[in-house]
Amino acid sequence: MFANNPPESKALWLSAALCLTFVANQYLWLFSPSYISSVVVGLSILTILFFMIRSAKKSPEITFVLLIVCFLGIMALGSATSAWDARSIWLFHAKRIYFDNNLLAQLDNYAAFSHNDYPVLLPALSATLARIVGHWNEVFPKVTNVLFILPPLVVISVTFTPLRYTVFFVASLFFMAGRLLTNGFMDGILSLYIVASLILLAILFFGWKEHLKISKGVLMASAIGHLAVLVGIKNEGTMAALIILFCLVVSLAIDKKRIEIRKISALFLPAFVISGIWLLLCYQYGVGNDVATNGNFTSTLAGRLTDAFSIHSIASALYYQKWIAFLPLCIFLIYFFQKNETPFKTASFLLRFGLLYSFSLFFIYLGTPHDLHWHLATSAKRTALPFFLTFMTCFLVLFTEYASKNNNKK
């Protein structure tokens, strides 16, 4: 049965399997940390990659993203881990898991500067690679981060066809994210999982890309896998999943579509269970988030709301970037479609998420206990990437549908 499926369907199945392997690896470290379990995970990933390469033979888009991931892997291996967050948070957490042979090593809150409340899904895979190889260094473990890029890029390659649209997405991603894809930071990976989750939900609930020969079961499995990984990347992943859920329900209500509680629960519940387990573990060990615990978030937020300089500083840091140009382009293109057309519904869903996510970041910066100038200077460009990539994806959805519409008229 699997052999008779089109390459797009196979690739989405395999991307879902890869996501679930990433999640399973984390819990193998929690319940059964051994060399054999690491080898099993490694062989599982290699098997999935083998079948994905086979399925790519008939799809130039999938072939392209596989080549891109290979290129990024080489780039990651050829660069030292020097950035603060990459070295002192993510790679440090992976190093502790590896040497302590314990997924929860960081919950002793040693070196609290390393944000010990951050999830460990990606560090756990880095630790698995180190255990398979048999030793640790500061370069090769982070190459596993590149593996996490593959599932969302497969979603992009399946939905944005022909090849030129996939190339446009990847080229835009490179310009927007740059070295964030290979230097050990999580923001580029987080952005890709957000966009992939939004796309899969748009197909499932708004009827976008109805011509795709992919069953709802495959789409559901892929969406569940991407959302499960999303909440395990960093804390913003859980915030993004909550905003996605809110925007989905609001969009369905506005479009007067039936809100399928069981279907939505099946998609989001695994992700929220994974996130909830981690939050409970952090609470049990007394490990808190620096923004939420260092100072009074509410009073700081209220104080800065009346400070014009703070509001201007945050708005400039988040929005005064060249990628904001995608937002007016989306607003311009969306009026070429009727409100009952699927591109309009899909674009509206994406825009709602992008705007609400950016407003959430705005309020987080208003309440930060850290020096505002320092916090914005060290993080705003990275944290803004998810909503800018969402706007770019929205533009691409509208542009491809508009081009297809014009071709059909001819």
Image (cartoon, rainbow, N blue to C red):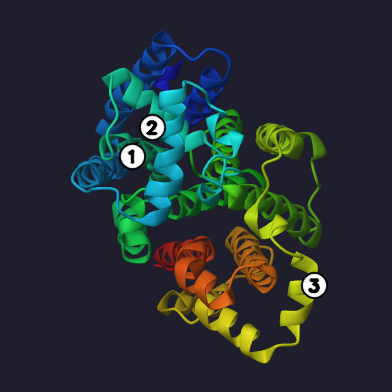
Q: At label 1, which amino acid type do we have?
A: Lys
Residue 160 can be seen, yes or no: no
Side (left or right) of 221 relative to 131: right
Say whether marks 2 and 1 touch (CB < 8 Å).
yes
Q: How many marks?
A: 3
| Residue drawn at x 37%, y 65% as measured from the top left | 176
Residue 171 image position (x, y, % from top left): 30, 61
Which mark is in front, 3 or 2? 3
Q: Secondary structure at mark 3?
A: helix
Task: Specify which label sits upstream in the sequence, 2 or 1.
Answer: 2
Other-residue count near label 2 (Cα within 10 Å), few / some / many at <14 / 14–19 / ≥20: many
Query: For this rendering, which residue is in front, 214 or 330?
Result: 330
Residue 205 image position (x, y, % from top left): 67, 47
Q: Which mark is residue 69?
A: none
| Residue drawn at x 72%, y 32% as measured from the top left | 266
Q: CA distance from mark 3 to mark 1?
A: 39 Å
| Residue drawn at x 37%, y 61% as measured from the top left | 177
Residue identified by numbered label 1:
142
Q: Secondary structure at mark 1?
A: helix
Residue identified by numbered label 2:
126
Q: Secondary structure at mark 2?
A: helix
